[in-house]
Amino acid sequence: MDMTSTYELAVARGPNRRRDPVPVTVAVGHRSSLVTAGLAATLARTPGCLIRVSNISSCRLAGEWPQSAELIFGDAALLKRLRESADLSEACSLTNAKFVWVTAGDEPSAHEAKLAGRIDEYVPLECADEELFALVQRLVGCDPSTSRTGTRGAVRGGLAPGAFRRVSKYIAEHLTDKITTDALAKIAGLSLGHFNRAFRQTTGRSPHRYVLERRIASARLLLCQTTRALADIALDVGFADQSHFSRTYAAITGETPSQCRRRHR
């Protein structure tokens, strides 16, 4: 049974919080209903946004979509079905929607799809909340910098969304390399001290911890989706050896890589 479920999200935006919110409809779907629910819950906490959620089951994808949607978040299969739908423009009014691929280890394919114009953006499933918030605000043209909250998709004093996106992208593309905080600070265009403070304010963790968690998230996907040896996975996500990988994995997740693999078999 296809477990895809979809949510409509109305995102209220505007520089003046006293004005009536301007709704922006967003459809969210994924083959895992848990992932869909998680995305909806995270988006519900976007600064300056008001979320209105409704569930549309996978069996209603053909011809029973909402009247319109400005943003669509989904996995590759869902986005492909929408793009290939013969009556998309008539039944769904989604021809002007912006498509966002929610990736899970398939970033290269998503990047190719973006270059080819099949999607507008992609975001990793394990991304930080602030990265998702900033993406939504950018795609819908919402600039809360002049609002009373004083935020730009991040808490006051944190990294600007553009800087965070550059840093996050660099980390994703260099997981197997040695990633230094100095290099990340230069990418963000900040001094080392300022970057460390702003990064912790934005993500709630140090740059080093954030990189480790991104590596562990990538390793978890490989553990669950492949039968590759632990030593190979350790090298693929940037650890020097299997021992260091296993210790770090257990410290962050509370279980060993082998236990994780057995649990998902």
Image: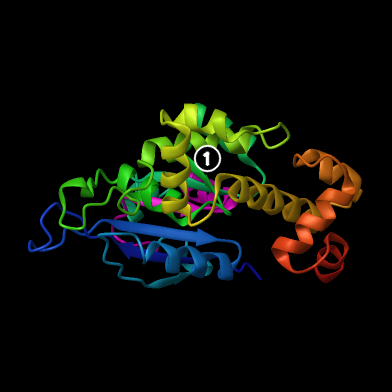
Q: Is residue 200 left or right of residue 8?
A: right
Q: Is residue 139 left or right of residue 100?
A: left
The outermost residue toward the front is: 193
Residue 62 seen = no
Q: Secondary structure at mark 1?
A: helix
Residue 119, image x and y in percent?
47, 38
Amino acid type for the residue under numbered disc 1: Ser
Structure colour scheme: rainbow
Which residue appears at 34% of the width and 60% of the height? 46
Quadrant where the N terminus sits is bottom right
Question: Which of 200/108 is in front?
Answer: 200
Q: Is residue 140 above or below residue 175?
A: below
Which residue appears at 47% of the width and 67% of the height? 60
The span picked out in magenta is 64-85
Which residue is identified by label 1? 168
Which residue appears at 78% of the width and 51% of the height? 222
| Residue 141 belongs to magenta span | no
Residue 212, image x and y in percent?
67, 49
Residue 35 seen = yes
Q: How many discs appear?
A: 1
